[in-house]
Structures are given as C-alpha cells and as structure tokens.
Image (tube, rainbow, N blue to C red):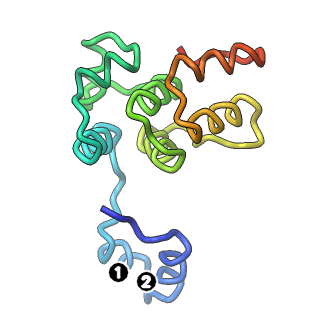
Amino acid sequence: MEEPLTEELLQELLAAPDPHAFAERHRLEKRTLSEYLRQLLEEKGLERAETVRRAGLNDTFGYQIFMGQRGASRDKVLQLAFAMGLSLKEANRLLQAAGANELYCKNRRDAIIIFCLDRGYPLQKADEELYRFGEDTIC
C-alpha cells in the first residue's frame, strides 16, 4: 500500500480544522513493532521463521518479537531490517515502531548502516563494513 508523501500530509494537516479530524481521516495510530513486522512479511512475501534465521536471532526471541510479547533493542530491529531487505524508509519506520531512534546520517555508525541498507547489503556484509571502520557491529 503506497503511503502519501510526508509533505502532502503536512500541508493537509496544516489546512485541517483540527488535528483530530486529520488523524481520523488518515487513521493515524501508533503502529506497533509486531504489527509493522507482520505487514512487511505480507507485503514482501517473506516467512517469519526464515526472517528470524537470516536476522541471526534465537527462534523463541524472534517469535516473541513478532507476536508483540517482547520488545527489541535498536540493533535487533536493524538485524530484522537487513534480514527483510528493507529500504532506508522502511527500516526507519520499523525503528520508529519499536520506539528506537531512526538512522541519522550525521552519526558515523548510522551513516555506514544507511549506506549498507541503500546498497542492499546482507547483515553480515553490513557488520563487516562497520568492523572495517572500527564501529560497533549490529550483531
């Protein structure tokens, strides 16, 4: 499902009589991590078990994240983003749903992660790039 551009939504929000009407019209609700993960699996035709394996997560822990029974650290969310082959925009939305900071290009480690996401690197290659630059790896 194609989401409207942020700029378009901003203009509509500023023209709205009140924020409640705008929020109802666009069904703006806080998206949970598990809801967004399930949505991404469906959109991308991925299987949960394979995604958890590719993310290098323990099966039980991964299942609990997908079911909303456990939260995930920023790095665990990034592991899932790489395992799912997410774009930068999708990865930032996933981080946001998890209550974590989005990737920030002025942060050296985040800049390397952004570069790797943009190039479609697998998680292992992203970790190799982080290691090569002396940054903490994701896993």
Mark 1 surroundings within 10 Å by alpha-carbon count, few (fewer than 14), some (14 through 19), many (20 or more): few
Which image quarter is the N terminus in? Answer: bottom left
Q: Residue at x 37, y 19 (%)?
A: 54
Amino acid residing under circle 1: Ala
Q: Position of residue 5 (x, y in %)?
A: 49, 70
- Residue that carries the numbered disc 1 in the rendered image: 21
Q: Position of residue 80 (x, y in %)?
A: 41, 28
Q: Residue at x 33, y 59 (%)?
A: 29
Q: Nearer the viewer, residue 55 or 98?
A: 55
Q: Secondary structure at mark 2?
A: loop
Q: Residue at x 27, y 48 (%)?
A: 43
Q: Position of residue 101 (x, y in %)?
A: 58, 40
Q: Which label sits on residue 119?
A: none
Q: Position of residue 63 (x, y in %)?
A: 24, 21
Q: Secondary structure at mark 1?
A: helix
Circles 1 and 2: CB atoms closer than 8 Å: yes
Q: Quadrant of residue 41?
A: top left
Marks 1 and 2, how far apart in space?
Answer: 6 Å
Amino acid residing under circle 2: Asp
- Residue that carries the numbered disc 2 in the rendered image: 18
